[in-house]
Image (spheres, rainbow, N blue to C red):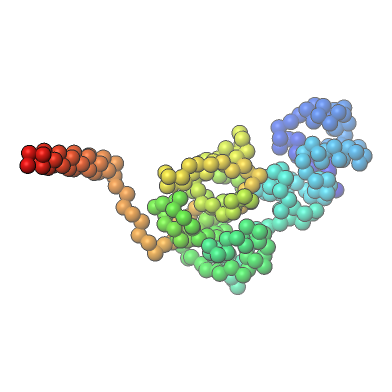
Amino acid sequence: MYFASNIKFLRKRRGRTQDDVASALQMKRPTLSGYENGVAQPGIETLVAFSGYYNISLDTMLKVDLTRLSGSQMGELERGYDAYIKGSNLRVLATTVTPDNRENIELVSEKAKAGYTTGYADPEFIGDLPLFNLPFLSSNRKYRTFQLKGDSMLPIPDKAWVTGEFVQDWHDIRSGQAYIILTSNDGIVFKVVENDIEKRGRLVLFSLNPLYEPYEVHINNVRELWKFVHYISDELPEPVLPEKQLLRTVATMKQDLYQLKKSMGRDIEDAEEI
């Protein structure tokens, strides 16, 4: 049983003192110290109280050594999502490997996206996806490729194949970088991210296309994150004009419009004289 070490680990992880926790659970501090050191055994009502206080199932509090979990697994657990942990069994990322034990890159097409939102943790579903490898990517990291839909990330075009590197620890999410995000509400989205997890428990998602407004996703609704690595497309992106050239183009257009209006004005005057 891991109850004693777990409650001590959780308290320290959340930056709380023994006095804080004892007060919240309406017990004396020496009593809490006894539970954390394993010299006292709590009753069922106390166990339930700890479970409710940390919002972690009693089964997990007793059977899983929380100190051995990765950052992303602890994050999932603390957000109340139990896909990673069932009793004492840890869920690892469903993946496929080559005969020589190298990670494959699974291909999630637009047609497969709907199934991925529910089957992403199912090894059988992942095993049925098309597989490929790219020799210039690291063999020590996990990658997956998703097909893009829509124009929200222009100049990356519709139907492009976007490859991401699996993000194990969500504390590594960097603002200003692009990520492929699996959400419980919107499915798979590809956006530039602002990390606001620590302060407000959310991500703010931005499109490259300025026609689309940014929006927020609570971290509870996030299931997977893949950091953008590259994309593959058979379309050549539209050229991006330098700022000075763009201003010059706009100025020329304004001048042409002005000349057109003047010409139309002269034509009208000539018609009136006739």
In this rendering, position of residue 148 left or right of residue 61: left
Q: Nearer the viewer, residue 219 or 47?
A: 219
Q: Position of residue 106 (x, y in %)?
A: 56, 65
Could you tell me if residue 39 is visible in this image?
Answer: no
Is 206 rendered above or below residue 22? below
Q: Position of residue 206 (x, y in %)?
A: 49, 44
Considering every residue shown, the one lying at the far left of the view is: 274
Q: Which residue appears at 50% of the width and 48% of the height?
A: 191
Could you tell me if residue 268 is visible in this image?
Answer: yes
Q: Position of residue 22 (x, y in %)?
A: 83, 29
Determine which quarter of the picture holds residue 126: bottom right
Q: Nearer the viewer, residue 144 or 104?
A: 144
In this rendering, position of residue 256 left or right of residue 109: left
In this rendering, position of residue 88 left or right of residue 101: right
Determine which quarter of the picture holds residue 236: bottom left
Q: Which residue appears at 62% of the width and 62% of the height?
A: 115
Q: Position of residue 124 (x, y in %)?
A: 67, 67
Q: How many marks?
A: 0
In this rendering, position of residue 130 left or right of residue 74: left
Q: Which residue appears at 46% of the width and 61% of the height?
A: 159
Is 228 rendered above or below residue 29? below
Considering every residue shown, the one lying at the far bottom of the view is: 99
Quarter of the figure that contains the C terminus: top left
Is 18 rendered above or below residue 9? above
